Image: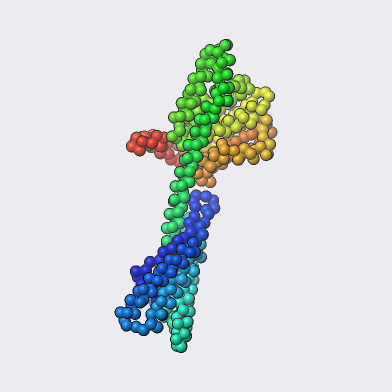
Amino acid sequence: MKPPASQQLDLSGANRDLPAPVRPRYGVPWSLVFFVATLLGFVSSMLAWQLTVTLERTGTYFRWLVVLNCAYWYTWALFTPPIVWLSQRFRFECQGLVRAVAVHLPAVVFFSLAHIGAMQAAQWWLVTADGGEFRWWSAAQRAALMNFDWEMMTYWAIVGLSHALLYYRESRDRALRTAQLETRLIEAQLKTLQQQLHPHFLFNTLHAVSTLMHRDVAAADRTLMRLSDLLRLTLERLGEQEVTLASELEFLRKYLDIERMRFADRLVVRFDVSPEAEAAFVPTLLLQPLVENAIKHGVARKSGAGHIEISACREHDKLHIEIRDDGVGLSEDALTALHKGIGVSTTRARLQHQFGADFRFEFHRLSQGVAVIVVVPWRVQTPAQTTGADEASRISGRPGIRAIRAVS
């Protein structure tokens, strides 16, 4: 028989993460599912008891209603895990919609007929227990005609609730990961600032300034100004998650100007950046940690002059960036350790969060030195979007908010 209309099916479904090549799935909480089924069975029993009192039926009829209502909900409770699994595996999304329909259509027929069969088994037990005769074929036909539509609605209700819970947890997890990533970004920016303020770095810079004061006061003054500009620019960019490549290169040049005071003629840097590429957006502090690694692991360990080449250009709908040095290079173990470092792992995590799988971040060992390749989607900012973003920034009070678009 059909359950009362006032009863609603509750379901704690599984959920999936987002935006990843393989999204994890969540298990079905069996205890919660059967608790809900028991609760619904209890409510159904109370309604059945009221019905027996109203109709002045015997206790036998009451027992029938209790058994059938409990059997109804417990059977759907048993069916819930595989249905939720199908909902996770074959979701109704733009991609894979045809496959989802092809799977769920036979599934709804199967589970509906299976549930009707289970209910017929419960009725058979009740009838035979009372000494009656149960005609399977006629009872099954009658149940299929009367209840098949309701069974299908129950299946789709479970699928719908499962999808709703999946999307809810997916959205919650995405918001949590975004908050965590923003925290890591701020920590990385603060760490970069701390590295610039590190006593060893300041000692080397001030020592170079002290040496220059005796032979080139103007050069010493320029070095102090560059250090001041670098620290100021670092503070100004703490609220920004992405900047134009031109802005990133400006920061990088100020950093390299100070490093040249330490290495003098031993550090030679060449830029090969197309004017078009300078307008593209990149994550903040993308290049500085990579160039710092090139200096630390390549140029600093080389006895002679070390060269670093930084190139960037547009390749179709991608921005291609390459940082190449001719230093002493890295062994396989050293390269593996570098991948596990905070700078490289944080950079990779930021790229994955912002672009999903649509990026490349690779290290290549060369005969002399190492090449780092970063390929991200090509994105620029239009003047109209700039005006709108500035207004949004003014209203929200949050600097560094930009409206960007992909250009193919």
Which residue sits at x=45%, y=82%? 126
Give the colour scheme shown. Answer: rainbow
> Residue 86: x percent and y percent?
50, 62
Is residue 249 visible in this depiction of the protein?
Answer: no
Question: For this rendering, which residue is in front, 273 or 262?
Answer: 262
**Camera-side residue: 53 or 332?**
53
- Horizontal and vertical percent position of residue 81: 50, 64
Write the residue at 40% across / 83% down. 60
Give the mark count. Answer: 0
- Position above or below: 254 against 88: above
Asked where in the image residue 291 lies, by quadrant, the reply is top right
Name the spot of residue 82 as percent of width and height, x first: 51, 65
Q: Is residue 24 visible?
A: yes
Is residue 368 shown left or right of residue 374? right
Which residue is painted at 55% across and 35% down in the image? 321
Rendered residue at 51%/23% (across/down):
227
Please identify the quadrant where the N terminus is shown: bottom left
> Position of 378 compared to 44: left or right?
right
Q: Residue furthest top?
A: 215
Residue 346, how many percent across, how many down? 54, 39
Q: Nearer the viewer, residue 267 or 132?
A: 132
